[in-house]
Image: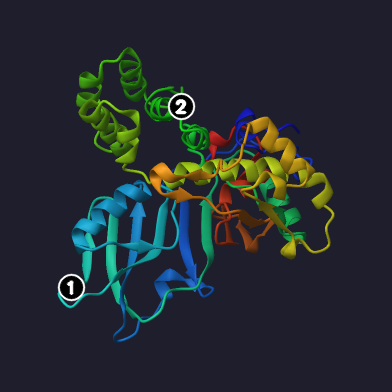
Amino acid sequence: MIPHEIDIALGMERYYYEDWNEIDGTIERPNGFKVVEEIDFKPAQEWKGEEKGKYAVYLLTKWGIDHFSVLSEIQKVLHSKVNYMGIKDASAITSQLVYITLTKKQELINEYKSNSFILKFLGYSSMKFNHTGNIFEISLSTSNFDLVVERVRQIEKNPYLPAFIGYQRFGTRRPVTHLIGKYLLKRDWEKAFYLILTYPFLSESKEIIEIRKLIIKGDFNEAVRLIPSKFKQEKLLLKNYMKFNSYYLALKNSFIPISLYLDAYQSYLFNMYLSRRLDKYKNSDDKDNLFIRIPIYFNDCDDICKEIYLNEEIEKNFFKLPEFKISLKSLNRKAFMNIRNLKINEETRTISFVLDRGMYATVLLREILRGDPRKFT
């Protein structure tokens, strides 16, 4: 079966791992998609702190809010820079550890609740954490659940799938994050700016589509007035541009770290490379130790990598962006992900499993369901 057009746009060009047909299936977000960070192979809620230490550690549980928005809010609550180990899905119920470096004047809170997250103090730590993966529990709505059960049982026998970097990395509703990264690396500040703010997708609300059209027309004042508060990146970039009259300076003061866009473009290159190598790698006897390297220098590429870089017009020093003090490193990543503790509950119609850090549950859902990924992301 040929991948959906979005799969192709995100570098997942080749056929799926198994030869299956599409199943109708949706997930109620955020309640039907639960993620718990795994620390030392145990759920984050089970982490036990020390009586004293360099870091104060909190359990953050959030729902229906993006990572950078919740980070901004809890930094105000804790009056300190907050450290984390992974960016969790916005349209899900997620639990993870966050921590702050203690100072002599630090005042700690035991618990804080809002309408989109709960922050709970767990204890102290003198060292950083061993983030081993993420635990998922996903509720599926489908008229073909028997077929889902059959496919899960099949994957259980050989629990490895291509370690594609999933849809969230590129933008679930507007899959353009990697393209923004490419324009930034090309130093085309104007195109990067307008790709963030304009190019409306039909999957967006009518309200946001109309706001993006206002920006296209150049009616920035009205657009700023109408942009909902949760669209912090769009609102801030537009205000920055109106203040500085410079695309570069508008981006320089971005709410979302610029490195996120650059990493997304490197992820796109990884997906393309893995897709083109998949037929060769599929029959490997040692999938746990099969790695892919996406180098920053053309001369370090193999033939497939060179072909991709030539098509993408990647030149010398392409992955360095001194204007933002960013220099990307080569990307090293496993070619396959191991799906641990895969289970399916036929009564509750839920699938549960564990993935190593940096692996995406939507890649497993893509393999099982096929079809338009917007239905299950």
Q: Nearer the viewer, residue 332 or 106?
A: 332
Instruction: Name the residue: 28% across, 60% down.
Output: 118
Label 2, secondary structure: give it.
loop
Q: Is residue 124 above or below residue 87?
A: below
Q: Nearer the viewer, residue 157 or 222?
A: 222
To which quarter of the image does residue 237 belong? Answer: top left
Task: Pick the quarter of the image with the N terminus.
Answer: top right
* Percent x, y of residue 182: 52, 35
Q: Nearer the viewer, residue 282 or 331?
A: 331
Q: Is residue 29 above or below residue 291?
A: above
Q: Is residue 163 above or below residue 318?
A: below
* Percent x, y of residue 348: 53, 54
Q: Is residue 373 left or right of residue 65?
A: right
Instruction: Name the residue: 68% across, 31% down.
Output: 311
Q: Which residue is mark 1?
A: 106
Marks 2 and 1, how far apart at CA: 44 Å
Q: Which residue is mark 2?
A: 203
Q: Is residue 68 left or right of residue 172?
A: left
Q: Mark 2: which amino acid?
A: Ser
Q: Badge 1: how crowded within 10 Å, few (<14), some, or many (20+)?
A: few
